Image (cartoon, helix red, strand yellow):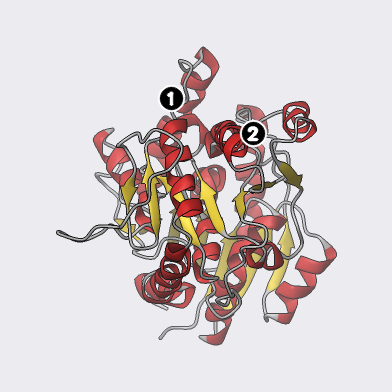
Amino acid sequence: MVARSIALLCNSDAAVRLYRYPLIAAMVKRGCRVCVLAPTYTAGTRKRVVELGAEPVEFQMKRIGINPAEDSLVVIRLAILLRKLGVDTCLSFMTKLVIYGSIAAFFAGVPYRYSMIEGLGYYFTQEEQKDGVRKVLIRTAILLLYRLSLPLNRAVFFLNPDDPAELATRGLLRRTSALVLPGGIGVNTQEYEAAPLFNDPFTFLLVGRLLRAKGFREYVTAAARIRQEYPHIRFVLMGDQDANPGSVRETEVRSWVEAGMVEWLREAADIKPWFRATTVCVLPSYREGMPCSVLQAMAMGRAIVTTDAPGCRETIQRLGSGEALGSKKGRFATSGRVIPGRNGFLIPVRDVDALVEAMEYFIINPELITRMGGESRRLAEERFDVRKTNARILKEMGL
């Protein structure tokens, strides 16, 4: 074990607060000096980083968008800051900092450079409509910048096997060590403890930033159909607005609420009480790195409905050969496209019929919910525990 001076480059205060605390703690425990860089800090996050034994450091950067002039200044400022901090190791997260952080660390003379791509994001996600010119141009720019920046890293971590496979087909990983973390981003199974089944009222919950690609529209359409036959079922959305160009407008979300189709909750400081008050968690996403909300729900013993898409399919353990689930006949026609698993169901992307079928399956077969929730917790402990994920990261970084 070698103690080093490490800079973690994060794109927001929320990214530090929601995902990085266990990794920071693990690095500090190994005797490393850890500087946590983010564009902004709330007082609470800054305090927590200090309590963990690390140094919170702010720098200037816009999280969304590509502007050559502004981004060149970001690289210069980061390079100067990294040299001033005197770090010998840099680990960058998310697209923009993977690109600019890697370049800045190279020019700052940081010898140990690593990055984590936590999903390819909006510009690589296929939606129903054909990609516009702007989206195509920005995706092309990202690919060119990846071609420049990824080889500067000793290793690049991915959360699912589909993302490196896609970049490899584009010839971007030939000079880069790409490592897939088996547990994805991981979940703190000690913080997110298994909770008793909640079924009064029967509640579905979708958690995520208000992006079209999270499947919000499909979820709301399915909710409206199910409520026609099962008016007692509760459907909840939890998420806030995002600057991403793929966002759902707030006016549209409010129209869903006013029509009585769903309830909408903005982000909560502590999401655990909402998981406890949930029967089944749903994420009909088009693509993820690894969905944090699903892993949290699994750790708390909730059955899952998600899509057979990159990052999502890894969260469902499929049934083995010869295994089958018993089924009662529902009120909706079956699509035949739902894939059953031990801890939930996989459905095709943008397939409302399959989503309705999967959710109704839980309504008419409630005895499966506890069993599948138990399987979710088991998978969270065995495959997705953040301690195992962080141990793999530290090993690959030689810490």
Where is residue 337? Give x, y as percent.
31, 37
As helix, strand or loop, the secondary structure at mark 1 comes to helix
Whether residue 289 appears in this view of the structure is no
Disc 1 versus disc 2: nearer the observer: 2
Q: Residue furthest left?
A: 321
User: Badge 2 local density, few (<14 within 10 Å), some, or many (20+)?
Assistant: some
Residue shown at 59% from the left, 75% from the top: 195
Residue 49 drawn above or below residue 135: below
Residue 269 is drawn in which quadrant? Answer: bottom right
Q: CA distance from mark 1 to mark 2?
A: 18 Å
Residue 270 drawn above or below residue 2: above
Q: Amino acid at mark 2?
A: Asn
Residue 192 drawn above or below residue 257: below
Where is residue 20? Give x, y as percent.
59, 66
Whether residue 100 appears in this view of the structure is yes
Q: Which residue is mark 1?
A: 140
For the N terminus, give its image quadrant. bottom left
Q: Which residue is mark 2?
A: 244
Residue 373 drawn above or below residue 225: below
Badge 1 or badge 2: first in the primary sequence: 1
Q: How many marks?
A: 2
Q: Which mark is residue 334?
A: none
Query: Foreground: 7 or 22?
Result: 22
Q: Amino acid at mark 1?
A: Thr
As helix, strand or loop, the secondary structure at mark 2 comes to loop
For the C terminus, give its image quadrant. bottom left
Where is residue 113? Give x, y as percent.
44, 59
Where is residue 98? Give x, y as percent.
50, 48
Does residue 135 appear left or right of residue 263 in this picture?
left
Circles 1 and 2 in contact, beta carbons < 8 Å: no
Query: Foreground: 38 or 330?
Result: 330
Residue shown at 71% from the left, 57% from the top: 13
